[in-house]
Image (tube, rainbow, N blue to C red):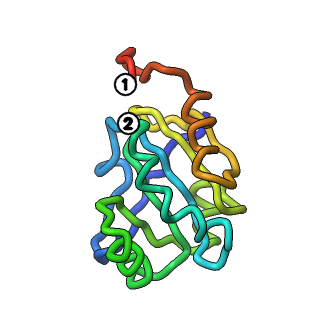
Amino acid sequence: MDKLPDIELLNQDGHSIKTIEAWSGKELLIVFLSLYCKRCIELLPDLEKVKQHGLLLIVVTNGEVEENRDISDHFGWDIPLISLNNNDMGEYFNVFETPTIQIYSKEGSLLSKGIINYADDITFYVDSIGSKTTLGEVRE
């Protein structure tokens, strides 16, 4: 089973984040976007709504730290935006096409993944993992 990689990444503030240290014990919903992809850009305004699923939302783009900061400021987000080039998306997360979603358990195991075209597609993948967390707590 695929696991969350133990790597160090940069967020939109230029701060280093160690994935396992920062995200361990949390169910994650990671959305991978390219800033050169029309479908990806069209998803940006709807991503804030995704937080309603009760998972920690992380957005990974192939943009530079400054570009991610501009996106975060424009939308007024508190969502972490991570900079990662296309090659590293492939190497560390096995992501070769965007927009893509991955959902990880609290233990860091990959639960679901796939290509998304609309924000509503995210609900499909969240529903595919069921209504319970890995610890048996019912998600609201």
Query: How many numbered circles are shown?
Result: 2
Residue 130 vertical placement versus 60 (above, below): above
Residue 112 vertical placement versus 32 (above, below): above
Q: Position of residue 58 (x, y in %)?
A: 42, 55
* Closer to the camera in the image, 125 or 21: 125
Give the left or right position of residue 34, taking residue 134 as reference: right
Residue 56 vertical placement versus 112 (above, below): below
The residue at which mark 1 appears reads as 140
The residue at which mark 2 appears reads as 54
Work out which quarter of the rendered image holds the N terminus and state it. top right
Evaluate if marks 1 and 2 touch, with contact meaning CB atoms under 8 Å apart: yes
Q: Residue at x 64, y 60 (%)?
A: 99
Q: Residue at x 45, y 19 (%)?
A: 132
Label 1 – label 2 distance at C-alpha: 7 Å
Residue 111 vertical placement versus 74 (above, below): above
Q: Secondary structure at mark 2?
A: loop
Work out which quarter of the rendered image holds the C terminus and state it. top left
* Closer to the camera in the image, 1 or 31: 31
**Which image quadrant is residue 15 in?**
bottom left
Q: Secondary structure at mark 1?
A: loop
Give the left or right position of residue 55, taking residue 113 as reference: left
Q: Earlier in the sequence, mark 1 or mark 2?
A: 2
Three-letter code for the amino acid on which mark 2 is drawn: Gly
Q: Position of residue 95 (x, y in %)?
A: 66, 58
* Closer to the camera in the image, 99 or 93: 99
**Which image quadrant is residue 122 in?**
top right
Three-letter code for the amino acid on which mark 1 is drawn: Glu
Q: Residue at x 46, y 60 (%)?
A: 59
